[in-house]
Image (cartoon, helix red, strand yellow):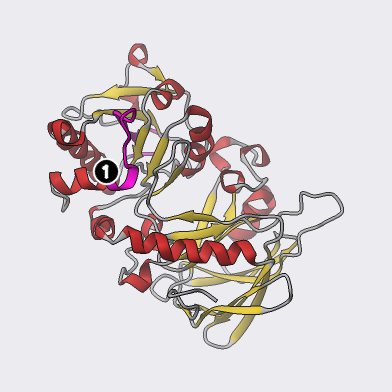
Amino acid sequence: MDGLSADELVQLILRVFKPASRDRRLAVLIDLPDRALPDRDEWRARRALAAGWVRALAAARDTCGLEVELFAYRNVRSNNAELPAMAWPVDPGRLPATADELADERSLPLDDVLAGHRLVMAPTELSATAPLKRLAPRLGFRAATMPGFTAAMVPALRLDYGEVDRRVRLLKGLLDRAEAADLAFLVDGSRRAELHIDLRHRAAHASSGLLHEPGIAGNLPSGEAYIVPYEGEHPGDPSRTSGELPIQLGDDVVIYRMEANQAVAVQGDGLIADTARRTLAAEPATGNLAELGLGVLAELGVRPIGQLLLDEKLGLHLAFGRSDHFGGRVGPSDFSRPEAVIHQDHVFLPELQPRVEAALVELVMPDGARLELMRDGHYTVSFDGGS
C-alpha cells in the first residue's frame, strides 16, 4: 500500500469522512487510458494503488464497517472536464489495462453509482474535482478527489488535520472579509508586476481534508482556503481585477495582462509565449482568473513534489479557466468543446517557479485598511489569532 498500513488507511477514512450509520458504501473511482490518451507509469501505479486500497478496506470491513467497490470510467481527455455518463464495476484483482477492454453490457450510469455510494474516493489521472463538486449536492455523496496522487504524498495524509483545518478557516475568514487582494511579483529579482484582484460578491471556501457533511467534494491531501475573483456578472458592475500576472512555464516567463478579470494579452518571446497567445485566442475562457488560493502545508514542513494535488496546498496559487465548481460563473459551456475545459493552477514556490517571486500579498478591507498576508513567499499573518 506504498506507505499506508491497513490500520492507517482505515483511520484515514474515519478521519476524513467521519462515517455515520447510514454511510456504509464507499466507491473508489479510477479513470482508464485509451487510444486517445495512452497510459504512463505513474497512472498505472496509481490504479494499482487504488486497487490495493480497495482490497485492504474490504479485508478490514469488520473494523471500518464499509462495503467498498472499485469503479472505472473512460478518461475525459482533460482536467476537470465533465465526467462520462457510464462507469464499470471492476475487480481490484484484475484491473483492465485500458478503457477499450470494458464491456458495454456491464456498464452502469455513473449518476447511479454516485447516488448509491455516500462516500467516494477518486485517485484519478485527470482531475474530477470540478464535476464531482457539481454533482455532490444533487446526488448526496461526499467525495475525496485525489488527481495525480502518488506514494510521495502519503506523508501529507499523516498530518494533524485538526491544525490544518484551524489555519485554513482563519484564512477563509480573512478572504471573506476582504474586498480585494493586491499582489506584487518580482521576475528575475527585478522586473516588478502588480495585480489587483476583485474579491467583492464572493464567499471563500475552506478545504482542510475533512469531509464530514453530505453534498461536498474536496481534495485529499488538502490544506487551503480559496476564493473565486469577482467575474463581473452583475449588470453595471464590472470586475475590477486588473494588472499583470507573470507565470513561469518551463524555463520561460510569460506575463498575462489582465482586464476585468480576463487575460487580454500575453507578453513574452519564444514558442511558449506564442502557444499561450494562440490558446488564449482560440479559447478565451482559459484566460478567466478562476481562483486565488492560499495553501498552508509548507508552513507545516511539507515540500513540493511536482504534483499539483499536493503542491497547490503549500502556498499561494492562482488558477485560470473554469470557476463554476467554486461558485463562479465560467463553466464548460464557455469552452468550445469538452476536452478544452480546464482549471489550471499555478503555484508560486521557488522550487516550481524560480524566476517568479510572490513579493507581497495584501488584503484590502471594506474600510480601506490593508492587511499584509504574505511577504517574500511566506505568511506574515499570525496563525495564532489572525489580524
Residue at image mark 1: 14
The spot of residue 202 in percent (x, y) is: 66, 55
Instruction: Describe residue 138's horizontal placement relative to residue 366 as left or right.
Output: left
Q: Residue at x 69, y 53 (%)?
A: 281
Vertical position of residue 198 compared to residue 14: above or below: below
Query: What range of the chain is rendered magenta?
Result: 13-38
Q: What residue type is labelled 1?
A: Leu
Query: Residue 381, image x and y in percent?
Result: 50, 78
Residue that sits furthest to the right in the current view: 236
Above or below 83: residue 326: below
Name which quarter of the figure residue 194 lies in: bottom right
Q: Residue at x 50, y 58 (%)?
A: 345
Position in image of residue 3 (x %, y %):
16, 53
Vertical relation: 153 (above or below) 121: below
Front in this rendered view, residue 235 or 41: 235
Residue depicted at 69% across the width and 66% down the height = 179
Quadrant in the picture for the C terminus: bottom right
Can residue 1 be seen by looking at this rendering? no
